[in-house]
Image (cartoon, grey):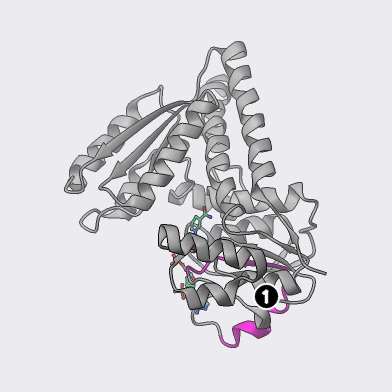
Amino acid sequence: MPATILSGKPIAEAIKTEVESEVTALEIEHGIRPCLTVVRVGSDPASEVYVTSKVRTAAELGIISQHHHLPAETSHEDLLRLVNELNADNNIDGILVQLPLPKHINEREIIEAIDPTKDVDGFHPVNVGKLSLGYPSLIPCTPAGVIEILKRTGIEIAGKHAVIVGRSNIVGKPMAAILLQENATVTICHSRTADLPSITRQADILVAAIGRAGFVCGEHIRDGATVVDVGINRVSDIEAVSRFFNGDELAKRLQAVETRGSTLVGDVNPKDAMAKAAYFTPVPGGVGLLTVAMLMKNTVKAAKTRRIEWPQKGSKSAK
Ligand code: NDP
């Protein structure tokens, strides 16, 4: 039987509806409207698409959104100055500096300069530390979205063996921390893992976050596994596209390559996943849709924590 497709759309829509209700309640009950500020440096086309979607979604849900678009030649010091200004502005709840930054800017220093209480991407070491300790924190949006897909679909996590391929700071590592907190038994694989297929084939839940189109294929997938594809890759090679899709989907993808020059493929070979897995998240239309929804959720969480919970607790130590 082919895998059941875990579509991200209804789950992302449900989360956005919940966020919208929370935003309305915050305004009615506390006179607060959460505010998200997105900073983009340079003109990377993918970043432009992501930032536009983040700013638009925020506005749709009643969150105030600001967008600072700086030229590619902006100096490290100028960006740092802007981050510090945003930190100091009490009306701003969430600060997101869109990555990647131009090479001359020290990405790590910029992330570390963001006030952890406004770090809606969840990349600041304070939030990373809290997550690994199991304390409440702002959690990176993409792995948080993966958990929402699993939970809201009723896929059991506790006691299951979750294998993650990829150990990046933004996906693989936080994914492992969250799955561990959800009581999965977690294995993390990477480019130096020996005999990868023998490990991934043990997975009840297999998460691919590698950055290589269709890398995870039949030999990596256990029959009946849940396969979560985080990858987003542009593929323009017709031969590769033919290895990943068949039937109507193949025709659709070849048409996309012809008209747009490429088609989006995840890190999992979808043809193989459909044949072997029990559940599979598609690309596009899977995890990617959750990332923006979870960013909105984090913004509201930051607003509530900063403006309602801490003032009531009345001390910095409450942080
Ligand atoms: P990175 O390049 O930062 O990390 C890739 C990871 O994959 C590394 O840990 C690397 O191992 C591992 N890897 C590379 N090659 C192999 C291999 N042959 N075997 C096993 N492991 C391997 O990527 P990201 O985590 O940032 O992104 C991963 C994917 O997820 C990308 O396709 C990206 O576009 C997508 N993405 C999607 C998002 C969404 O919203 N859906 C958000 C963020 C990312 P090592 O550490 O040893 O080098």
Residue that extends furthest to the right in the rendered view of this protein: 1
Which image quadrant is residue 50 in?
top left
Residue at 58% of width from left, 36% of height from top?
A: 297
Residue at 61% of width from left, 49% of height from top?
A: 145
| Residue, disc 1 | 272
Which image quadrant is residue 202 in?
bottom right
Mark 1, secondary structure of its residue: helix
Residue 33, horizontal then vertical, whole percent: 50, 19
Question: Is residue 95 something that shows in the picture?
Answer: yes
Q: Which residues are magenta?
A: 194-211
Residue 42 vertical placement versus 18 (above, below) = below
In the rendered structure, which amino acid carries the disc numbered 1? Asp
Q: Is residue 201 magenta?
A: yes
Q: How many marks?
A: 1
Q: Nearer the viewer, residue 98 or 92?
A: 98
Q: Is residue 220 magenta?
A: no
Residue 34, horizontal then vertical, whole percent: 50, 24
Residue 35 vertical placement versus 161 (above, below) = above
Q: Nearer the viewer, residue 271 or 190?
A: 271
Residue 124, horizontal then vertical, whole percent: 43, 48
**Disc 1 packing (10 Å; few <14; some 14–19; many ≥20):** many
Question: Is residue 232 something that shows in the picture?
Answer: no
Residue 116, horizontal then vertical, whole percent: 44, 40
Q: Quadrant of the N terminus?
A: bottom right
Residue at 49% of width from left, 31% of height from top?
A: 58
Q: Nearer the viewer, residue 14 or 296?
A: 14
